[in-house]
Structures are given as structure tokens and as C-alpha cells.
Image: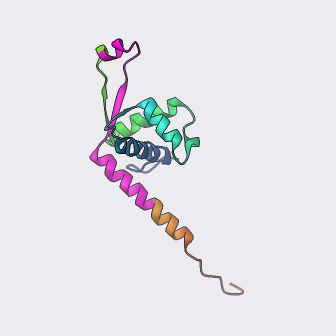
């Protein structure tokens, strides 16, 4: 099954939510492992089944314009004796897509909470 263009799967919404959470903690951008930790601390950590899943989703979000990324300075990584990190930052398009996903989720919750009319006897 193919998804409709411009729609986010729940795991992608979780990544954007994690980006907002980290930004509220003072981090305008975050590397993949930090985003994975934030997703794992979120509502539905079961969606993070493997880090390959995360990086594929990050790539889709970047190709869709929801995130932008940059590579860390190689000298800084070398001084820290580790590989370079790729940092991700949510774009304005990502902000609006997240707001739309939140609104859709709220609408679905509201619709599910409404009492359903009972069926007429014999109907």
C-alpha cells in the first residue's frame, strides 16, 4: 500500500514531535541518536524498531522538506575521537505538517469519543 503524497506516517510524526521537544529544551538541531532517544522517551517507543528505521525516516523527512540537515565539522568530531554527526533541524514545512498531523489526530479522537446513534430496531 502506498501512502498519499504529503502525508506523514506515525513514526515520522514522532520524529517531528521529538524535534520540537528537544528544541524546547534549548537544542535547535539534534543528531540522529539524540532524536532516537527522544522518540524512545515519547508516547509510543515501540515504533523505533531499529536505527535503520530511524535513518530511513530522517531521509524521507529531509527529502520531503520537513527537515534539513548538516554535517558536523570533521575537526570537531576528530577532537572528540568519534565519527562525524549529522544534525537535523525542522523546517517551516515540517512545523506546518506537524500541526496538521496533530489536528488530524485531535479530530479522530473527537470523532471516536462521540456517542454513536443507535440503530433502529429491525434495521
| Number of marks in the rendered image | 0
The image position of residue 52, as x and y in percent, is 51, 29
Q: Which residues are magenta?
A: 76-104
Q: In front: 122, or 63? A: 63
**Residue 8, horizontal then vertical, whole percent:** 43, 48
**Residue for point 37% across, 49% down:** 6
Residue at the extreme right:
122
Residue displayed at 51% across by 34% down = 53
Q: Is residue 113 left or right of residue 123?
A: left
Q: Is residue 47 left or right of residue 90?
A: right
Displayed quadrant of residue 18:
top left
Quadrant the C terminus occupies:
bottom right
Q: Is residue 20 magenta?
A: no
Q: How is the image coloured?
A: rainbow
Determine the residue positioned at 32% across, 49% down: 95
Q: Could you say which quadrant of the image residue 31 lies in?
A: top left
Q: Which residue is rendered at x = 46% and y = 63% of the image?
A: 106
Residue 57, percent across and down?
A: 44, 37
> Could you tell me residue 70's position as x and y percent?
30, 28
- Is 92 covered by the magenta stretch? yes
Q: Nearer the viewer, residue 1 or 34?
A: 34
The residue most toward the bottom is 121
Amino acid at each position: 500500500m502506498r501512502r498519499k503524497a504529503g502525508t506523514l506516517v506515525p513514526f515520522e510524526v514522532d520524529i517531528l514531535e521529538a524535534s520540537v521537544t528537544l528544541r524546547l529544551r534549548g537544542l535547535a538541531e539534534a543528531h540522529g541518536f539524540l532524536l532516537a532517544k527522544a522518540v524512545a522517551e515519547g508516547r509510543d517507543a515501540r515504533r523505533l524498531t531499529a536505527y535503520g528505521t530511524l535513518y530511513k525516516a530522517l531521509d524521507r523527512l529531509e527529502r520531503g522538506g520537513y527537515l534539513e540537515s548538516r554535517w558536523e565539522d570533521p575537526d570537531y568530531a576528530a577532537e572528540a575521537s568519534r565519527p562525524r554527526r549529522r544534525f537535523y533541524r525542522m523546517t517551516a514545512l515540517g512545523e506546518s505538517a506537524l500541526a496538521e498531523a496533530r489536528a488530524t489526530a485531535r479530530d479522530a479522537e473527537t470523532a471516536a469519543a462521540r456517542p454513536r446513534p443507535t440503530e433502529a430496531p429491525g434495521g
